[in-house]
Image: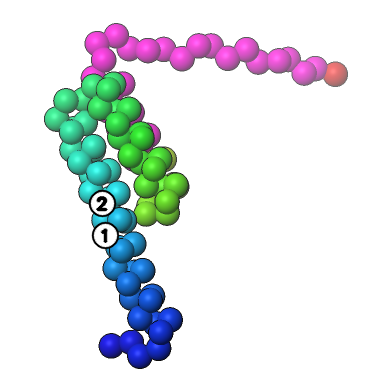
Amino acid sequence: MPVTKQAIKKVRQDKRKTAINLKVKQTLKKAVRDFEKTKSALSLKAVFRAADRAAKVNVIHKNKASRIKSRLSKKLEGKSSTPQSKPASKKKNKSK
């Protein structure tokens, strides 16, 4: 057990922050599970919101949030019946 006043306070803070971080992480996982069931744009938006919030408060790394969003977006694109083509890029011809 902690002895000093500051150590006792730190234990209280850590306990509270752990509970908050766990709630944020569970919200993200639930959003991902819901997306896997329905695969709709609305559920994808919920995942984006949860992932961005988790990254903002440092529960997960920002690159992990980006990776989650990217992978789930690909799953939604693959589900759509009409393939979306990328617009042709216009290359500037630099000749000297």
- Considering every residue shown, the one lying at the far left of the view is 37
- Residue at 25%, 51% (x, y): give it: 23
As drawn, 16 above or below 62: below
Residue 61, horizontal then vertical, whole percent: 42, 52
* Amino acid type, mark 1: Ala
Residue tagged 1: 19
Q: In the drawing, does residue 95 fall left or right of residue 86?
A: right
Q: Is residue 39 visible?
A: yes
Q: Mark 2: give few (<14), some (14-19) or many (20+) Cα within 10 Å.
A: few
Quadrant for residue 9, please give it. Answer: bottom left
As drawn, 80 above or below 37: above
Q: Is residue 74 visible?
A: no
**Which coloring applies here?**
rainbow
* Secondary element at tag 1: helix
Residue tagged 2: 23
- Residue at 27%, 43% (x, y): give it: 28
Q: What segment is highlighted magenta in the picture? A: 68-95
Q: In the drawing, does residue 1 fall left or right of residue 62?
A: left
Asked if the residue at tag 2 contacts the one at tag 1, i.e. Cβ–Cβ closer than 8 Å, the answer is yes
Residue 6, horizontal then vertical, whole percent: 43, 81
Looking at the rendering, in which quadrant would you find the N terminus? Answer: bottom left
Residue 50, horizontal then vertical, whole percent: 33, 39
Q: Nearer the viewer, residue 94 or 82?
A: 82
Looking at the rendering, in which quadrant would you find the C terminus? Answer: top right
Magenta region includes residue 90: yes
Magenta region includes residue 14: no
Q: Nearer the viewer, residue 6 or 68?
A: 6
* Secondary element at tag 2: helix
* Amino acid type, mark 2: Lys
Separation of disc 1 and disc 2 at Cα? 6 Å
